[in-house]
Image (spheres, helix red, strand yellow):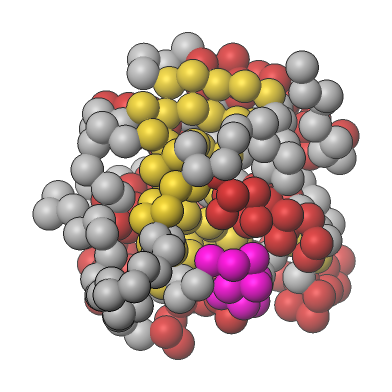
Amino acid sequence: MPSKPAVPPEIIDFYARSDEAARLHATATGNLELARTRELLRRHLPPAPALVLDVGGGPGAHAHWLAADGYTVHVVDPVPKHVSQAGALDGVTSELGDARRLTAAADTYDVVLLLGPLYHLHDKDDRLSALTEAARVVRAGGLVAAAAISRYSPLLDYIATTGLAEPAIQDGVRDTLDKGRYAGQRGFTVAYFQTSDELRAEVTEAGLADPTVYGIEGPGWVAVKAIEKYTDTNLLGTDMYDAALAAARIADPHPALIDASAHILAIVNVRPPEEPGSASPCTPSVFPPSPRN
């Protein structure tokens, strides 16, 4: 029986008190994160059925649609409430666990997702441990996807919500921009935020070569958040939401816009070992992009 994950108590307490299950559905910005993450993953996922390990998968927001798509999904999360919520979903199993010390055997999953752990691991060695564990348990030819929160998201968020007018918030934003640390000033718990270059470098250092890095929400999320706050209106289904979604897609080929998103996603198609006479490393992934939208 694995020991209880050594996660800072303030992080466990934050998620025990908050409704993470509703976060991606309650606002247009949350739905933009969900829709774009799903869209980007579907470009790269192997065909169903395949085995997916959703590490730090929370209450199963992504496990839910993955299972509906026909994947077999197992969620690992350090928050007991999340483990119970995810395990109650059809086609999903769950366990209490730590991204840095997975119980899965090597080479057992077709897909490993790290859509939450990295921004709760303040030390680089811990983030590398989580990424190395993902590389260990994924099968050759499989897929690893890791998400981070953009280093610049607090600055943009506090513009949208006018929190930046407060001197204490300004000091916190400066510290995050300089060092990546977020002290949980408002609306979130303590965290570590990354630039796209830093995420790419750490994924590569963990042995996951040639990641493709995307901005998830694109540059339009700030306008959506500001309008929702000051009109008290959910913009989901409006022209403004559609414009933000279109902007995210248009921004995809432009690296300079990646860090304008609130979240960043690195995706790696893990190459199988080279054999004599095999194709060159430039051969396309064994899993072609999904034709789904």
Magenta-drawn segment: 198-208
Q: Is residue 239 above or below residue 170?
A: above
Q: Tell me the residue at 82%/38% (across/down).
A: 7
Q: Is residue 177 visible?
A: yes
168 left or right, relative to 228? right
Q: Is residue 21 above or below residue 116?
A: above
* 207 magenta-colored: yes
Q: Is residue 239 visible?
A: no
User: Residue 221 at what x, y percent from top left?
Assistant: 43, 63
Between 101 and 145, which is closer to the camera in this rendering?
101
Between 144 and 192, which is closer to the camera in this rendering?
144
* 2 magenta-colored: no
Between 29 and 285, which is closer to the camera in this rendering?
285
Q: Quadrant of the N terminus?
A: top right
87 left or right, relative to 100? left
Q: Is residue 213 above or below residue 101?
A: below
User: Residue 55 at what x, y percent from top left?
Assistant: 57, 39
User: Residue 88 at what x, y percent from top left?
Assistant: 47, 12
Residue extending furthest toward the front: 276
Q: Tell me the residue at 64%/49% (across/down).
A: 133
Quadrant position of residue 167: bottom right
30 left or right, relative to 68? right
Q: How many numbered badges does the structure rendering display?
A: 0
